[in-house]
Image (tube, helix red, strand yellow):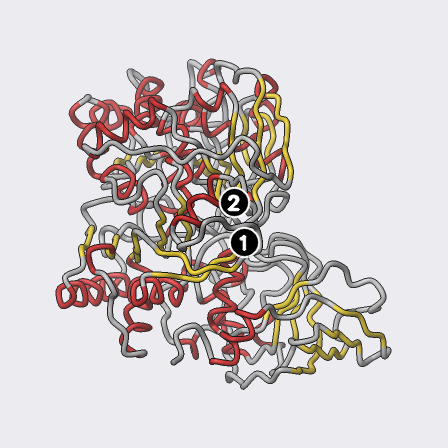
Amino acid sequence: MAMTIIEKILAAHSGQVQVKPEDIIDVEIDARVARDFGGANVVKNLVQNGLKPENPAKTCFTFDCNPGGSDQNYAANQQYCRLYAREHNISVFDVNSGIGTHIAIDLGIAYPGSTFVSTDSHANIMGAIGSFGQGMGDQDIAAAWARGKVWFKVPASVKLKFNGQFPANVTAKDIVLNLLGLYGANTLLGYSAELTGDCIDRLSLDDRITVSSMATEMGAIILMFTPSDAVLDELARRTGKRFQAVVADQDANYDKVYEIDACSFVPMVARPGHPEDDVAVEAVKGTKIDSAFIGSCTNGRLADLRVAATILKGRKVAPGVVLKIVPATDAIWMEALDEGLVKIFKDAGALLSNAGCAGCAAGQVGQNGPEEITISSGNRNFSGKQGKGAVYLASPAVVAASAVAGYITTPDQIPVNPAVFEPKGKFQSAPKAEVSAEIKDKPVVVEGRVWFIKKDNIDTDMIFHNRYLTITDINLMGQYAFDNLEGYEDFAKRVKPNDIIVTQKNFGAGSSRQQAVDCFSALGVSCIIAESYGAIYERNAINAGMPILTYNNLQGLGLENGDPLRVNFITGELTNLGNGKTITINPFYDVQTEIYQRGGLLAK
């Protein structure tokens, strides 16, 4: 049977001759990584369950979320992980190293055809080199460390077939923003998407990293490239190793094939709140900005810094505008220093930080304040993700040009005189904390009051904001559930034990944080029912023993917010006790039932 790239990699790592979509297999993991914010919970899971790393040589920590340890909780978690690493001979890429996924690519820890997991939800960036990478929650990573394998459901594949060539002014960031504009946050939900075409073959390693890094924002399992000869040569130069590309069979089966006109792509900007809310730069040109950011796992490569330096050379950042630049790795930082890029940035008035994830992880430079307008080369602009301001996403070229202009613009339209600020004189109060509830046991059949939340793409920052990521005590998590979801800020005060959440597509999109599941367990929510889930969120919930189910439609149930509902996890029977109507939704599948009955993935 012919197979796609991801099917070949998963088959090779599961001892199977072939695999097909929906197969549930145990996958051998070549590289098992925990970051600084998730690492402490990974270690706690191992220690509490009497488990140890199966192969320390394949296991490491990467401290990239808060590389300065500027937050006391982060610093405590990092030191906790260091102590554990010393006892178990585990490598630590410490606060001076940079973003773990980039280090893995540049050092050959991940390579074409390999498997890689991390507590980083952008671990699927490995698609850039034809490797299978996945972001996973704390329990998943603990299981990978202890057993060397994790269960995985083989995803269906789609092909994105590009025709023609990209216009000269279209960068890699523009490519992925155009794709988000075409397919949104859930069209590719749960798919492995292979990118093909002559224009794709021409993309550099850095370009591919930019595109692949935003697979998570598209809801995809991964955006997969077949490494070109040039990319294989670049990997050999960086790692000293010669790798072979995994190539899809010509007659491989794809669920869908999308034909894409590359010639139609234009420079794009994502408007605040959603990476998929994309428009041509022209539509927002002239928007005044307070700050600008270049970096993140999406655009912190040397090629990105070179583009920014070309625009900033001999120019100054507009008065009052703050430009923050964060290289992806320390090696890239040093290359920028050797090439004179650092001097250009400093002469222009930019703030240059040590390597790391920057504002994306709320642990480094890149955050913004209330009413602050930021243009960023990052991968996410969810409400509250980088602070309390509004974030536009764009390419490093547009970000650098806008920093000089003082408003959103393109490199070819930078004004002689930059825009100036007019004082607003406004103030905002801090948000109030919420109160948690007790965790309750969960039976096979549950009854409860419905919270019918009619929204797609509720991301993990809306569910459990990243400012609370240092919380590891589940009893303290419930009070923060949904406090960043508009209209549900007081959810934790009003929810009752056994309540049921019913929502729509792509619930739990975004980050790999386990707390976005555990906060509902802390409140006693009995189950969550959605049309679909973010891939990482689905795994986190199943592995934590939190009942989640999916439906194809709710027609015939007559469901209204507040209705009493009965759910049978095993049969999928769903009954509206208010009107007596019953429908059938998708029940637990076998591995979910087994984990639930066992009390969680790590329970013995």
Label 1: how many Cα within 10 Å (few below 14, some 14–19, many 20+) = many
Q: Amino acid at mark 1?
A: Ala
**Residue, disc 2:** 217
Residue at (34%, 62%) from the top-left corner?
144
Report how far apart the C-alphas of labels 2 and 1 lie in the structure: 7 Å
Q: Position of residue 492 (x, y in %)?
A: 56, 74
- The image quadrant where one finds the C terminus is bottom left
Q: Position of residue 284 (x, y in %)?
A: 58, 28
- Secondary structure at badge 2 equals helix
Relative to 281, residue 26 above or below: below
Residue at (35%, 54%) from the top-left corner?
118
Q: Position of residue 436 (x, y in %)?
A: 50, 79
Q: Amino acid at mark 2?
A: Glu
- Secondary structure at badge 1 equals loop
Label 2: how many Cα within 10 Å (few below 14, some 14–19, many 20+) = many
Q: Position of residue 265 (x, y in %)?
A: 57, 22
- The image quadrant where one finds the N terminus is top right
Q: Nearer the viewer, residue 299 or 447?
A: 447
Mark closest to the chain's N terminus, 2 or 1: 2
Q: Is 274 on the left-hand or right-hand side of 331?
A: right
Residue at (65%, 76%) from the top-left corner?
570
**Residue, disc 1:** 509
Q: Nearer the viewer, residue 436 or 219?
A: 219
Q: Is 225 on the left-hand or right-hand side of 285?
A: left
